[in-house]
Amino acid sequence: MSKQVIRNFSAGPAILPPVVFERASEAIRELRKDGHAREADGTGLSILEISHRSADYEAINSGATRLCHEVLGIPETHQVLFLQGGASLQFVTVPMNLRQEGKPACYVDTGNWSEKAIIESRQLGETRVIASSEASKHDHIPELPSPEAYAGASYVHITSNNTVRGTEYAELPALAGDVPLVIDCSSHIGSRPMALSRVGLGYAGAQKNLGPSGVTLVFVRKDLLERAPAGVVPKYLRYATHAKKPSLYNTPNTFGVLVLKLMLEWLRDQGGVAAMGVINQRKAKLLYDVLEDSSLYTPHARPGSRSLMNVTWTLGGVAEGERDAMTKRLVAAAADAGLRNLKGHRTVGGLRASIYNAFPEQGVRELCEFLREFERTA
Amino acid sequence: MSKQVIRNFSAGPAILPPVVFERASEAIRELRKDGHAREADGTGLSILEISHRSADYEAINSGATRLCHEVLGIPETHQVLFLQGGASLQFVTVPMNLRQEGKPACYVDTGNWSEKAIIESRQLGETRVIASSEASKHDHIPELPSPEAYAGASYVHITSNNTVRGTEYAELPALAGDVPLVIDCSSHIGSRPMALSRVGLGYAGAQKNLGPSGVTLVFVRKDLLERAPAGVVPKYLRYATHAKKPSLYNTPNTFGVLVLKLMLEWLRDQGGVAAMGVINQRKAKLLYDVLEDSSLYTPHARPGSRSLMNVTWTLGGVAEGERDAMTKRLVAAAADAGLRNLKGHRTVGGLRASIYNAFPEQGVRELCEFLREFERTA
């Protein structure tokens, strides 16, 4: 009997391409001099034991930084940093670094993750929610209000893709005036071309499209680095501290940065974000089409706000009393068929398929087929 | 020609045992159900792609936590946490969480790392240096002053092993009264039995005896968790937040925690910290004996304060004008012989051999032989 193919729909940490698993595994046995390629000379050491001050690691660090500019399209006006603590630590450091006296921090509330960001900001100073989709269970990306609503703000923060509710900004907003836009792009960076020149500061936990957990990508317009007063914000929490010797102020997650580099090389080899955007559009459309055509499934997010990365839906076509039991049955039957981790986020229930860059189109087709069959026999 | 054996004296990230490299590499290809063992069933997934909310990861997280108590000897009265950001972030969160109104934070200055901790503490409130070895280039662990010096303090902070200058507390101090002792034990935790019941809070970057970079072990007496006022300290930076759902408040460095678990299993299989302490005493003595017997080499640290983990010395036996050039020659000749990374910390120069738990005794013997031969022919 041939081994069952497993399709991992986990929202993150999430599936990586086979070549990245392969090279990461190899680098633990012995790091190659160029960071990974099998043809190159070995260093004689594992990636796990090399100093972050060594020439071999410096090459990984600077190579990964370069790829962030070249492959992700981060403008040269921005400083790239590989930090730790996930998006959750950024919820704290963004207001610490960017808030200015007497200027409120403005947030758009699109659910779970923006709410966590808002909580941290509120504790640190005046915080204004300028748009929210809460009233309709965060089923869409709300319109930005007119510029008067955020004029004079320290910054405007958005969660540009929302894993829990499955919504995404189809395009990053262009703010009026000189108010910096801050984006939490953890769950869709690298998935398609984005107008990153509109962004003052962006951050992303790596564990979706950029590799393993434990690395946070931050990119920040260089003129914003020094906004945080030196004697007030703790040294470790100032972006300027980490920018001085980029990503080497203290010991980074060296293995994580290597895997991030491998991910960006893979993305480049696929044709970069332009090619990836086309593939991701196609993958998501397959699934949304099945949900739209169905009388059992109801997509959660409204058209125009639908995430290409996290597709969320409920069993809207059955009576409420039976919904939870049938949802459980679906998740279990899918897992039996090798289609794993389709349960919605624990705070909202329902179903979710996370189909990041590394998730193969064939796996999406298998899920579509499964869902049609489940509906037919339900 | 047989391949040269490489001896990696890096101060961290540092060498891990071969079995840990092997199992970590394997877990990237496919995680086994018990976290690593080859005999157990495969999960069908890589450690890099599994959710931190999955049962497989929960087993790794709780297994690693248990081993911290059982193998490292962390008392059950203490909460174990796996965090991110290294010791450098702890320099900030310790004062944020433990400082009390009107009670100074007290520090012992034993060089580089304690100085960084002191800088962060000073920014956050009244900070008192109650002992220092600065006047003699941090060549020893200073005596603690009498209890009056720290009576009424929020806490007393020490760096219990100092990688840069190569000094170590032979025994953890027992403070008078109810002032909590805080230890940065990054570079020697797990190396020998320690009186951890004397400790209020301990922290350690994992990249020496506990595994890869990107994980920070924190253990904190449970009655201290709630010292930080909830509405004042940012939620993410409060230990209480991470204790509520231990180490799973946000996405942890999942791979890093797995490797930490593998390291602790290896340590257990060696006979634990008791057996390891005997081995480490023997390893360090070999090297200090060579340095003491020599007219070329001068150990930096005074007897009684010498680190078993980081052995530091200078070429005291040659004229100052020739010292730097000869030091460079030694480092280069050693590297040619496979003995790598003997250069002292960039801020102090000289020579340093880091011989953590995983560094084999045979490698120390090879270094001793090399040093004797270098002196003979110098």
Image (spheres, coloured by chain):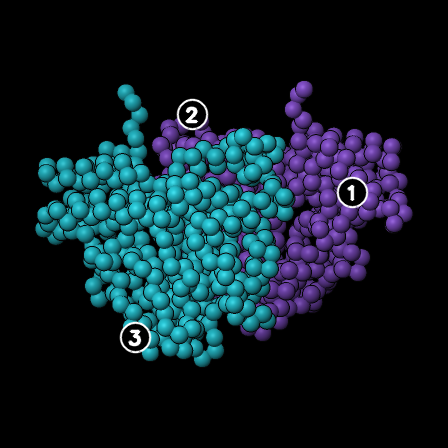
Chain colours: A purple, B cyan
Q: Is residue A370 visible?
A: yes
Residue drawn 42% across the image and 47% down it = B210
Residue A294, by quadrant, is top right
User: What residue is shown with label 2?
Assistant: A39
**Quadrant of the frame with the N terminus of chain A:** top right
- Residue A130 coordinates in the image, percent (x, y): 70, 64
Q: Are marks 3 and 2 on the same chain?
A: no
- Give how far apart the Cα atoms at labels 1 and 3 are: 64 Å
Question: Circle 1 — which element?
Answer: helix
Viewer-side residue, B206 vs A62: B206
Residue drawn 60% across the image and 65% down it = A121
Viewer-side residue, B19 vs B69: B69
Question: Circle 2 — which element?
Answer: loop
- Give how far apart the Cα atoms at labels 2 and 1 are: 48 Å
Q: Is residue A303 above or below residue A146?
A: above
Dot 3 crowding, Cα within 10 Å, few <14, some 14–19, many 20+: few
Report the amino acid beneath label 1.
Lys
Camera-near label (2 vs 1) is 1
Which disc number belongs to residue A328? 1
Viewer-side residue, A285 vs B193: B193
User: What residue is shown with label 3?
Assistant: B146
Dot 1 crowding, Cα within 10 Å, few <14, some 14–19, many 20+: some
Q: Quick check: A376 left or right of B355?
A: right
Q: Quick check: B247 left or right of B165?
A: right
Chain of the residue where label 2 is placed in the rendered structure: A
Camera-near label (3 vs 2) is 3
Residue drawn 41% across the image and 72% down it = B179
